[in-house]
Amino acid sequence: MLTVFMATRNGEGTLPSVLEAFTRLQSPNSGWKLVVVDNGSTDRTREIVTAFQARLPLAYEFEPKPGKNAALNTGLAYLEGDLAVFTDDDVFPREDWLVRLRKAADSQPFYTMFGGVVLPRWEVSPPEWLSWAPPGPVYTLTDPEISDGTTLPALVFGPNMAIRAHIFQSGIRFDTSIGPQGAAYAMGSETELTERLGRQGHKACHVSAAVVEHFIRKYQMEKSWVFRRAVRYGRGHFRRARAEDPSVYPNFLGLPLRLAVKLVKPSFRIAAASLRSDDRKVFSARWDFHFLLGYVIEAFFVGRDAQSNGERLACSS
């Protein structure tokens, strides 16, 4: 038995097509079920999911607390079997997706985490400049050069991820301080978990035969959206770096001055590339600038919160 988890918020634009794709999935011999956690939707999400309950082995749960990870933690109460599979409400699985993950988990007992391939499904043809953007951070697309077998935990992506159930049965949960929750947040909700498990000694496996397609909307192909994504990626990168090495910490009153100074370098690169009319280098420098900006922003927030907590502790002692 395996359980598939999907968190959604106002997903009526893609949910009907995604759930229709789920009706065509080949079932593993051990069976499967789908748990959809509605994270405070105000659209027709509940109605859409309910309409598929006669066609899918489906459970619906509502979690009003904002945050994808909060929703996934709520869904884990429905975990059955020995394998938890995770995906998103804008991801289309190939028909043999679950069969391939099941086979990998059964034949590779050495691994705790399994990640498959995430390909793009473009709403419209992407502009040429989009090839300059890093596909992993921007669209959660996997590197086609990754080979089967052992891989880095950070390369197991949320839209196509499986983790052995005993991990969650031991009490481990997603970190609710990271991941989608509103317009501004630190990226890396699933990556935080896989890296945490990696530090505990768990191994990750890449499964190239397990394939899904991530729907990329037209507005997500605008440069302004991509650079906002760079800020979120930078914020998440700081949190993950600090989890791995606590010495990564703000320098003065919550402001990482050394990092703030680093923002000057890509600013000069933007100016220089603009003078040469080198659009690709301008884009690269702007991505680096927004990534570092996100890193600095998150460091400031973390430092401010830590300072505030320290002050409260001092007052209570």
Image (cartoon, rainbow, N blue to C red):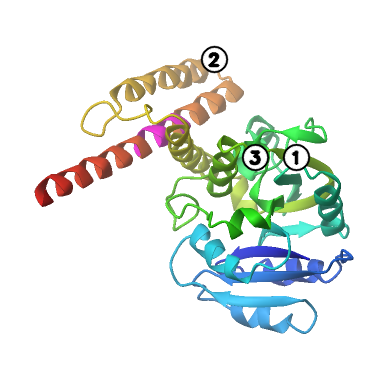
Q: Badge 1 is on which residue? A: 205
Query: Which numbered disc, 3 or 1, marks the residue closer to the eye?
Result: 3
Is 253 situated above or below 39?
Answer: above
Q: Mark 3 to mark 1: distance in Å?
A: 10 Å
Decide which of 114, 235 is in the foreground and name it. 114
Q: Quadrant of the N terminus?
A: bottom right
Residue 246 image position (x, y, % from top left) = 39, 31
Q: Helix, strand or loop at disc 1?
A: strand
Dot placed on the residue nearer the N-terminal end, 2 or 1: 1
Residue 317 rendering spot, x and y as whole percentages: 11, 48
**Residue 66 seen in the current view:** yes
Residue ID for mark 3: 202
Q: Is mark 3 on a helix, strand or loop?
A: loop
Callout in the foreground (2, 3): 3
Query: Which residue is painted at 83% across and 35% down in the image?
Result: 148
In the displayed structure image, the side of residue 300 where residue 95 appears, left or right: right
- The question of residue 26 being in magenta is answered with no
Give coordinates of residue 258: x percent, y percent: 32, 20
Query: How far apart are labels 2 and 1 at the CA level?
Result: 44 Å
Decide: few, some or many residues near mark 2? Use Cα within 10 Å; few <14, some 14-19, many ≥20: few
Q: What stretch is highlighted in magenta?
A: 291-297
Residue 220 x %, y %: 60, 49
Q: Residue 276 carries which label?
A: 2
The front one of 15 and 195 is 195
